[in-house]
Each structure stands twice: as structure tokens, then as C-alpha cells.
Image (cartoon, rainbow, N blue to C red):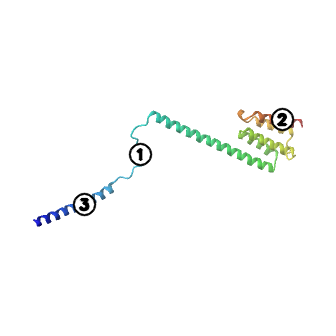
Amino acid sequence: MLLFFTTFLLLLAGVSLAILLKRLSDQKLLEEDRPPVLAAETYRPLFAPTEDELRLAESEERRQLTAKQADEVRQEHEDKLRQLEEFRQAWLASPNRAAAIELLHRASQVQEGDAYLETCESILAVWRDGRLADLPAGDLAQLLETHFWLLPAENRTPGASFRLKEAAAELRSL
């Protein structure tokens, strides 16, 4: 009986060892044949999005696009203001008639009434100091007014318009 029991245990150990080795080899085969991980964008949702979700996603895209465009416009406007200020500082170092006309043109292209008015005041200050002698008073008044009309109507504020008309009237009276 002991012989049968020992034989049975040896057989059981052999079968257990064979099953264990088979599982280990099958595990390695499974790992080798495993497909690469699929990218997340290839998965599809379990349910199709509802109309409300589609409208919400579309409105969010439009809002982001509008915000991006507004940011680009704001950045472009800030760049124009910075370039105008740099040109104004360079012009103040050595003022002349041609550069004054270019300065007025650039100030009108910024499309901001306050920036244009500051530019006009700096040109008038230089003209009053006598550093812009090659520009007659009447021509300067005409330049200030005509370039002011290049500004969009919503940027031609009454205050800026009044101050500019006073300066032009003063120049014409000289």
C-alpha cells in the first residue's frame, strides 16, 4: 500500500510539474503574441453624443476661436502701439518734416484717438520749440486734421476732436 501511495504522490507531483511548466510556457507565448497598445483616439465612445453635447462642444469651439482671434487682435494692437512709441522716440531725437508726416500716418493707423492725440501734442511741442522749422503752421494744421479723419469714427472722440481743432485753429492764427 505504501508503494501505491508513493507512486501516486510521485505521479501527482509529475503531473503538477508538467501543468506548471505548460502554464509558464503558454504565458510566455501569450505575452509574445499580445498586440501593441492601441492609441486612445482609436477608441470610440460607448454611446453616440447627444444633440445637446454636440451643440455644447460646437459652442465651446466657437468660443475658443473667438477668444483666440480677440487675443491676436489685442496683441497686434499692442505691437502697433509699441512700434508707434518707438518711432515717436526716434523722431523726437531728430525731428524732420518727412518723419513727422510718417509719424502722423502711423498714429492714425493705430486707430486709437488717445495715441493720435499724444502724437499730435508731441509734434506740436517740437514745432513750438522751433526744431521743425521746415513745416509751416498752416501745413501742420492741415496734416493734423487730415490724418485725424483717417481714424475710425468710433475712435474720434469728442474730447480729442475738440483739442485737435483748438490746436489747428491756433496754428492757423499764427
Q: How far apart are the two marked residues, 1 and 2, measured between alpha carbons?
A: 69 Å
The earlier-in-sequence mark between 1 and 2 is 1
Looking at the image, do the residues carrying marks 1 and 2 touch, with CB atoms under 8 Å apart?
no
Q: Nearer the viewer, mark 1 or mark 2?
A: 2
Q: In what element is the residue under mark 2?
A: helix
Q: Residue furthest right?
A: 174
| Kind of residue indicated by mark 1 | Thr
Number of other residues with Cα within 10 Å of mark 2, as a class: few under 14, some 14 to 19, many 20 or more: few
| Kind of residue indicated by mark 2 | Glu
In this orientation, does residue 26 appear? yes
Residue beneath disc 2: 166
| Left-right relation of 20 to 59 | left
Residue beneath disc 1: 42
Residue beneath disc 3: 20
> Looking at the rendering, in which quadrant would you find the C terminus?
top right
Q: Is residue 115 above or below residue 38?
A: above
| Kind of residue indicated by mark 3 | Leu
Residue 133: x and y in percent read 87, 45
Residue 31: x and y in percent read 33, 56
Residue 113: x and y in percent read 74, 38
Residue 58: x and y in percent read 51, 36
